Image: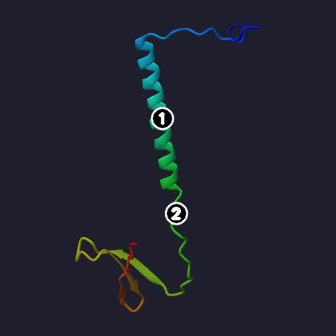
C-alpha cells in the first residue's frame, strides 16, 4: 500500500497570492495571541489589599482644589482640617 493513497485530503499547490493570504492571516493571529497574553499578564498583577481600619471620628470631606489647590480635605467637628497623604509606589 502506498503512503500517498492513505492521505484523506488531497494535496494542492497554493498560488503565490494564497500563500501571502495564509501568511498574513497566521501573522495576524500570532499578533492577536501575543496581545491577549500580554494584556492578561499585565492585568493579573494587583496591588495588595490595604487593611481597613475602623475609624469612629466623624469628618466631612471637602474638595478645595478650586480654592487653594490642596485637593480633598477632611474637616473634623472641631473645624480641624486633615489632608490625606497619597503614597504612590
Residue placed most toward the observer, 58 or 84: 84
Mark 2 or mark 1: whose residue is earlier in sequence: 1
Query: Horizontal placement of 26 versus 5: left or right?
Result: left
Q: Are marks 2 and 1 in contact (CB under 8 Å)?
A: no
Horizontal and vertical percent position of residue 43 = 50, 54
In the rendered view, would you say 58 is above or below 47?
below
Please tell me whether mark 2 sits on a helix, a strand or a loop.
loop
Q: How is the image coloured?
A: rainbow
Residue shown at the point (47%, 21%) measured from the top left? 22
Q: Quadrant of residue 83?
A: bottom left
Residue placed most toward the observer, 24 or 88: 24
Horizontal and vertical percent position of residue 36 = 50, 43
Residue placed most toward the observer, 32 or 66: 32
Pointer 1 residue: 30
Horizontal and vertical percent position of residue 35 = 46, 42
Pointer 2 residue: 46
- Determine the residue located farthest toward the right in the rendered image: 1
Q: Which mark is residue 83?
A: none
What is the quadrant of the N terminus in the image?
A: top right
Query: Horizontal placement of 21 versus 69: left or right?
Result: right
Which of discs 2 and 1 lies nearer the camera? The answer is 1
Horizontal and vertical percent position of residue 85 = 37, 80
Please tell me whether mark 1 sits on a helix, a strand or a loop.
helix
Amino acid at each position: 500500500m502506498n503512503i500517498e493513497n492513505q492521505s484523506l485530503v488531497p494535496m494542492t499547490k497554493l498560488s503565490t497570492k494564497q500563500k501571502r493570504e495564509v501568511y498574513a492571516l497566521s501573522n495576524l493571529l500570532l499578533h492577536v495571541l501575543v496581545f491577549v497574553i500580554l494584556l492578561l499578564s499585565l492585568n493579573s498583577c494587583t496591588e495588595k489589599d490595604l487593611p481597613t481600619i475602623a475609624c469612629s471620628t466623624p469628618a466631612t470631606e471637602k474638595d478645595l482644589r478650586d480654592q487653594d489647590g490642596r485637593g480633598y480635605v477632611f474637616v473634623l467637628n472641631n473645624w480641624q482640617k486633615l489632608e490625606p497623604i497619597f503614597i504612590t509606589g
